[in-house]
Image (cartoon, rainbow, N blue to C red):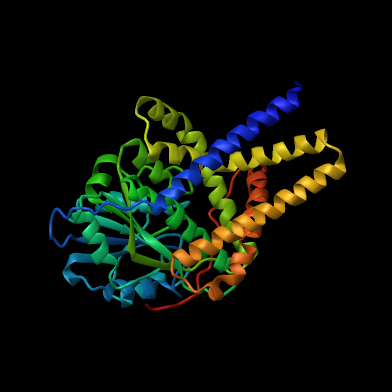
Amino acid sequence: MKTLEVINIIIMLLIGVYSIYFLLTALLLFKKRKKSVTLSDKYNHFTILIPARNEEAVIKDVILSFKNQKYPKDKCEIIAVINNTTDNTLGVCNAEGVRSILCERKIKNKGDALKEAFDRLKNDKTDAYIIMDADNVVNDEFLSKMNKCLNEGFLVAKSNMDIKAKENTWVSSCYAIYFFIQSILFSIPRNNIGASGAINGTGIMIKKEVIDKYGFNVKTITEDLEFMAICALNNIKIRYVSGAICYAEHPSDFKVSMIQRRRWTRGIYEGFFIYFSRLIKSLIKKPSIEVIDSLLIYSTPLVLIFSMISALINLLALPLKIFLIISAFGLLVNYIAVSLCALFVCVKSKKRVKEYLTGIIMFPIFLLSWQYLNIAVLFKKEVVWDEIKHIETQNI
């Protein structure tokens, strides 16, 4: 058997295992979830941290959404973590009576801002931290739902993600579908069997004792996935809280989306090199679905690159006409499958399909564009923390 054929078979087996794993775990969506036991009726104190760069246009909305919570006012404090700002973000926070931390260190990303905030707040009395973005808005039961989760014994939790402007563009709609997939086909199935959901983006609750014990020593530009890996390595369960809803502004412009997702992709590569060996050692020592999940998530860009290598091998091995026919058929099948998946999660999330129709149609293209990013990032030594302008105001 030729060397290229052997390589192709190995690649296809790896991709097959990867795909089957996520397909089988997604089917746990239909498994009945065991009810959690409430251990306390305490009103926990929350410290809401809002890292903010130049966010004067939107930060007031997230502040007001926390001020309007159906939760005791004395049981939460809002703190803006202001860094690299050149606008009036601080003035807006002062006008709303919000405490601000002005970062004194060199801040390269959100993780750096949070590290400084945690260091400066370590002696403050609180039960848990809520990490938000300045462009977010939350529903009025957000803290109540997170409090219930905390009282059920969970140390880390992730909110339900939605977007502010569903009908803005096909790009913002695709972002919504991307987060629906993570919730419906990843987090909920795992919670159904008592495993950890995903940490992605914002709306994250962390009990203070976790920060006190393990710190927040993230090193990559994707601090959310990195903290998820840290939780997996330390056997900390992550609870997905569907009733705590976080509405976020996502790029409406495709070019801006590519800049943001290039940053995410770079962070995943960085996390792969930092955590791969640790995750493998942990998997050998004490296997868990959480460790497997982190390992495979960090391997996703490589899996996609391998699929392209396989396509190139087939191009060399097959007559051009047959290769084109097979490729066209494969693309068509994948397009239909991905579109149906997007449709399914919209329906399962109880969304009006009409509002997300352009996103459903274009979602396969949205994912395909990630293939380019997976390759492009390999040839770019550093991806900087580009500022994403936020302008979408909304009150819930």
Residue 125 located left or right of residue 49: left
Q: Position of residue 140 (x, y in %)?
A: 29, 73
The outermost residue toward the top is 1
- In this view of the protein, can residue 161 be seen by the observer? yes
Q: Is residue 220 above or below residue 286?
A: below
On the rendered image, what quadrant is the C terminus found in?
bottom left
Residue 134 left/right relative to 337: left
Locate the N terminus by quadrant.
top right
Q: Is residue 198 visible?
A: no
Which residue is pictured at 41% across the width and 49% down the height?
28
Which residue corresponds to the image point at 50% horizontal and 66% vertical from the top-left?
Answer: 346
> Residue 136: x, y in percent?
41, 68
* Of 105 and 235, the residue lying toward us: 235
Q: Reply above or below: 318 against 4.
A: below
Residue sitting at 36 percent across and 53 percent down?
114
In the rendered image, residue 256, in percent from the top left (x then y), is placed at 61, 63
Task: Using the image as rendered, state which of residue 40 and residue 352 is in the foreground.
Answer: 352
Q: Position of residue 391 (x, y in %)?
A: 50, 74
